[in-house]
Amino acid sequence: MEELDPKLERSFRGHKGAVYSVSFHPSGQQLASGSADKVVMVWNFKPQLRAFKFVGHKSAVMSVSYSPSGRLIASGSKDCSIRIWTSSVMGDSHIIKSHVGTVRDVCFSADESQLLSCSDDKVIKLWDVNNHYRFKSSLIGHSNWIRCGKFSKDGRLVVSGSDDKTVKMWDIRSNQCVHTFYDHTDIVNDVQFHPESTLIASTSNDKTIKIFDIRSCKLLQHYDAHKLSIHALSFHPCGNFIISASKDKLIKVWDIIEGHQLYTIHGHESCINDIAFSRNGQYFASCSDKPFVMVWKTNFDKTACLSPPECPAECKKKSREKVKEKENVNANQHHSHSHHKRKKAAVYERPATAPMNKEKMVQGLHSEEQAKRKEKEIHVRQEKEKEKEEEEEEQLKKQKKAAGHVNASHATSASVIPEQVSLTLEHIVNQLSIVTQTLGVFEERLSMHEDRVSRIEKLMEAFLENQAKRE
């Protein structure tokens, strides 16, 4: 019989400190990891190939990310720098020094034209990959350290999470924040776009997972997921499942279509720092405060998603529709999970039943009917609201006309003050945009100066070498 439970496939050992980040090569044949030992390791799944060790950072490596083509690896470090490595034995790297705080996350856009970096300096920076990693722009708006950031599928949006307890969504064409989600009550540790970029999932020190719809900007699902802070999550490529990793040493698998937990996976002996699915969803990798990386065989996706290389668009479309149906059932539903006895020699716990009482099960069965009724109610409510708004507008117009006839030559103080306020606000906004543009220009010049300094350093080194040879 075909195995449908996740199982540990292998582990990679070689780091000398806690491992903070993992990222799969698009082919699934390699895995990159970043550690407190200041090293980026690239592990090969073929046993005859040895691991690559990339040395260059002067402090702990907090984040690693493969480019979509797999030819580059970006890493962010506590030394405030970003390095872009060529994914080969040579491990050549380009260094970017622009942040003034720890770089906690790095991410490539899907077309590999851009790279983003998130830092403790409260700024997200965008870099032009095709133009020697030139600085493009900054996204400024968070009021505390920024822990995570990701591009949407089309590269037009960026989502970020911060110590200020907010999740922000940015439009990179205007470099403006288009929406802020205030639902978390503690530090936001990780954010991810759904594979189709219609949803956002976030995790926090408040021990919850939250899923938002980016079109309505509403909370769709809420999970009281772990007993301690949740450090990372990852969407399965078909969009039906989420895996979460926590300080409580547990990995949990969630079916976001049915809205309940599938598995609790034991195996780590310390706080889990990161987790990630491979591109085809066959495997997922996790890392912790121990100096090794674990790779797991997924298996559970066989019942809901088609097998690799990619889940088709139909599967993803179905998952989106089902999540929307669950909005009415799961928006305010908190999922609590009973503890089952752990099997001997097993690394997972599979809930015997979905964690729902009878009433919730009935709700689940009739969710489609409820959704339809709700849509009708909303439609009727919207029509009534529109009618009221139209009536109010007509009344306001009549009042203004009447006031115009009575006070044609005398402007009231009530009419003057709002105009003055709006003008002042417009002036402030204009000044802020000028300041932002000036900062952008300043950062560009800084990067140019950094390039010049690096060239001068190289020339000096060459000069000193020549002098030494002559002597």
Image (cartoon, grey):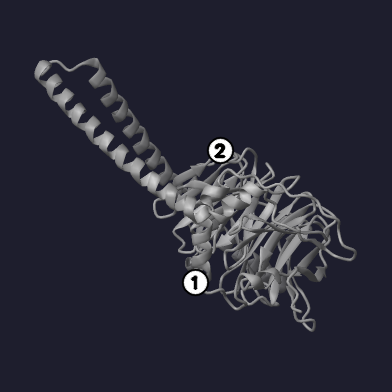
Identify the secondary structure beneath mark 1: helix
Instruction: Identify the disc placed on residue 404.
Output: none
Q: Residues within 10 Å of mark 2 (few under 14, many from 20)?
A: some
Q: How far across and how far down the image is residue 348, in percent?
A: 80, 62
Q: Residue at x 47, y 47 (%)?
A: 217
Where is 401 relative to 220, above or below? above
Give the residue furthest to the bottom.
48
Q: Hey, what amino acid is under mark 1?
A: Glu
Q: How far across and how far down the image is residue 325, in percent?
A: 50, 55
The reply, left or right, for residue 414 in relation to residue 217 is left
Q: Residue 40 is drawn in which quadrant?
A: bottom right
Instruction: Identify the disc placed on residue 143.
Output: 2
Residue 209 appearing in the image: no
Q: Residue at x 47, y 62 (%)?
A: 155
Q: How far across and how far down the image is residue 436, in percent?
A: 43, 43
Q: Which residue is mark 1?
A: 314
Q: Quadrant of the N terminus?
A: bottom right
Q: Residue 200 is drawn in which quadrant?
A: bottom right
The reply, left or right, for residue 49 in relation to residue 362 is right
Where is 415 relative to 364, above or below? above
